Amino acid sequence: MAQYEQGGGVPLTAVRFANDWASERVLVGVLALCAIAASRDTIGAAIEARPDAWMALAIAATILLSALVSSIAGFAFSAVAGSALAYLKVDPVRAVQAMVLCSIATQLYAVWQMRASIRWRSLWPMIVAGAVTIPFGVWVLVHTEGPIYALGLGAFLTIYGCYALLRKKARVVRGCVWIDALVGAFGGVAGGLTGSPGLFVTIWCSMRGWDKLRQRAVYQPYILSMQFVTIGCLWWHAPANVHAAQDLHLVPFALLGAIGGLALFRRITNTQFQWFVSLLLLVSGVGLLVRAL
């Protein structure tokens, strides 16, 4: 008889992570060298006191810390990084582009690590619905003056995050294909607008009563798929503003943070994971409100 993880119905053999620690240590070393090489010019500029050097260092630090925190739960990278980038007054379109690019890198790493637990066939309704609605969200992002669209989403996430943290016992909700598709569609709009397609899907997964690995095996592949669609839509709607190569130097910082975050995820319980998810939803809501006000 197959063994099951406490708090969920997924066999342990189906939710294992890739466990080649030697390879992971090599990867960390390579990424650290890449990060040093990528920041060499910036460090030199900081020593010479150039005015733009500290901004570049601040952006790199923001990416690394945001990836570390968000990778513990597997989402909210863009929400966490977006608030800091908005405070640094980075152009909104470029900020979304940088966040999507780094998020693709971190999600690819996480999805590869948990590939044994992902059931792609059941994800297609959610992914297709999100891919259909992302272009609308990107169009609003490119053509709308001011972040008014973030107010409603930020208020909703803040209220829900507070509720999730304060509730004594979560109610388990049953799903179906149509609800999955509807949630995926809402996630697509949010992804195009804010670079955070996983917010609604994460809430939906947390309501299902699943263990931490099963939840991530649903919303992380969804987020990854939506990020590919988002970067394509940004290129289509605003090709003059989209130059992905200029942000590639941030990817090593994001991956270093993702490796650390996933290592912490392996060590937390299902209860601690659910609490952290609720906290990140609250942080995401507050971050969107700060960016909008």
Image (cartoon, grey):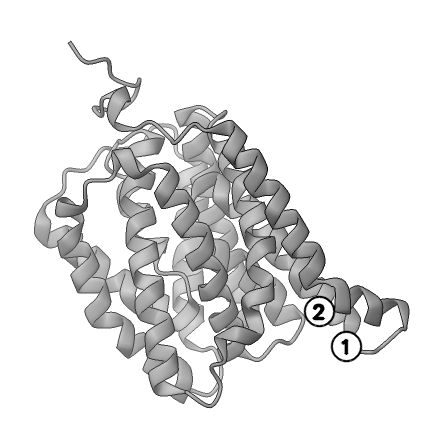
Q: Name the residue: 50% across, 80% down.
A: 243
Crowd band around label 1 with a 10 angstrom C-alpha radius: few (<14), some (14–19), many (20+): few
Q: Which mark is residue 52?
A: 1
Between 74 and 209, the one nearer to me in the picture: 74
| Total count of labels | 2
Q: Name the residue: 41% across, 55% down.
A: 157
Q: Which mark is residue 249?
A: none
The quadrant of the image that shows the C terminus is bottom right
* Residue 137 in sight: yes
Which amino acid, mark 2?
Ala
Between 18 and 96, the one nearer to me in the picture: 18
Residue 227 position, x and y percent, is: 36, 63
Q: Name the residue: 33% across, 78% down.
A: 233
199 up-or-down from 54: above or below: above
Q: Which mark is residue 56?
A: 2
Residue 4 in which image quadrant: top left
53 up-or-down from 8: above or below: below
Provide the secondary structure element on which disc 1 rests.
Answer: loop
Residue 210 position, x and y percent, is: 27, 31
Residue 168 position, x and y percent, is: 38, 28
* Residue 50 located left or right of residue 205: right
Residue at the outermost top position: 1
Label 1 and label 2: CA atoms lie apart by: 7 Å
Q: Are marks 1 and 2 in contact (CB under 8 Å)?
A: yes
